[in-house]
Amino acid sequence: AAVGAGDGLVAGYSCKDPESQGLGAKGSRCSTVCKDHIFHDGVAEHAQVLLMSRRDPWESLCSRKMMDVWCQKPPPSLELHSWAERDAYKQKCLSDAKLERAETVRQCSELMGMQADIYRKRRAAGRDIAYDMLLG
């Protein structure tokens, strides 16, 4: 991306509405490359070209586990009020096969939902995904 955009490149995470940033405006020489898992206001409607990438589910799940986002959200049926209770739940979840299986299903469903939501919102805005590349 940097080769194609030269000095007019903006990059980062948590993508902002390109129109609100002046990107894509007539005469603008700026491009943005942004990595995100969800659309923030205006992105689905105003991004000129949208590229996606995805990995095999096991790679995504492994990555999330290594990034320590595993067992962070207890089931809604559990009311945990303190950090100590949350930490105890996390330790139990990481060591209990039944809880970890449920966490795997929850994480996978969350990832699939985020990807489907990108497609849904982009198409609702009358736009499409230019390319969705399978990594790996």
Image (spheres, helix red, strand yellow):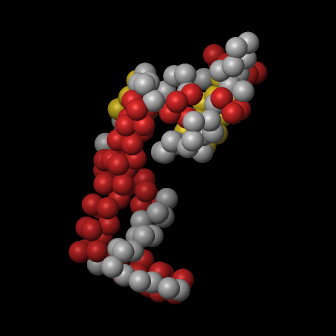
Taking the spot 55% from the left edge, 22% from the top edge, the residue there is: 48
* Residue furthest to the right: 7
- Split into 4 quadrants, where in the image is the C terminus? top left
* Residue at 54% in and 83% down: 83
- The image shows a total of numbered marks equal to 0
Q: Nearer the viewer, residue 21 or 73?
A: 21
Tell me if I can see residue 54 in this picture. no
Image position, residue 108 (x, y; %):
31, 54
Is residue 103 rendered to the left or right of residue 65? left
**Vertical placement of residue 68 versus 13, above or below:** below
Instruction: Tell me what residue is drawn at x 69 percent, y 19 percent.
Output: 25
Across and down, in percent, residue 14 comes to: 60, 45
Q: Residue furthest top?
A: 27
Q: Is residue 65 above or below residue 43?
A: below
Q: Between residues 67 and 29, which one lies in front from this camera angle?
A: 29
Q: Give residue 59's position: percent from left, percent from top.
A: 35, 48
Locate residue 127: give its quadrant: top left
Q: Compared with residue 28, is residue 67 higher up or lower down, i.e. above or below?
A: below
Query: Is 76 placed above or below 27 here?
Result: below
In the rendered image, which quarter contains the N terminus? top right
Q: Is residue 30 left or right of residue 96?
A: right
Instruction: Tell which of 131 and 125 is nearer to you.
Output: 125
Say left or right for 48 vs 70. right
Q: Position of residue 130 (x, y in %)?
A: 43, 21
Q: Determine the image quadrant of residue 77.
A: bottom left
Q: Quadrant of residue 97?
A: bottom left
Residue in view at x 48 percent, y 45 percent: 37
Q: Say if residue 43 shows up in the picture.
A: yes
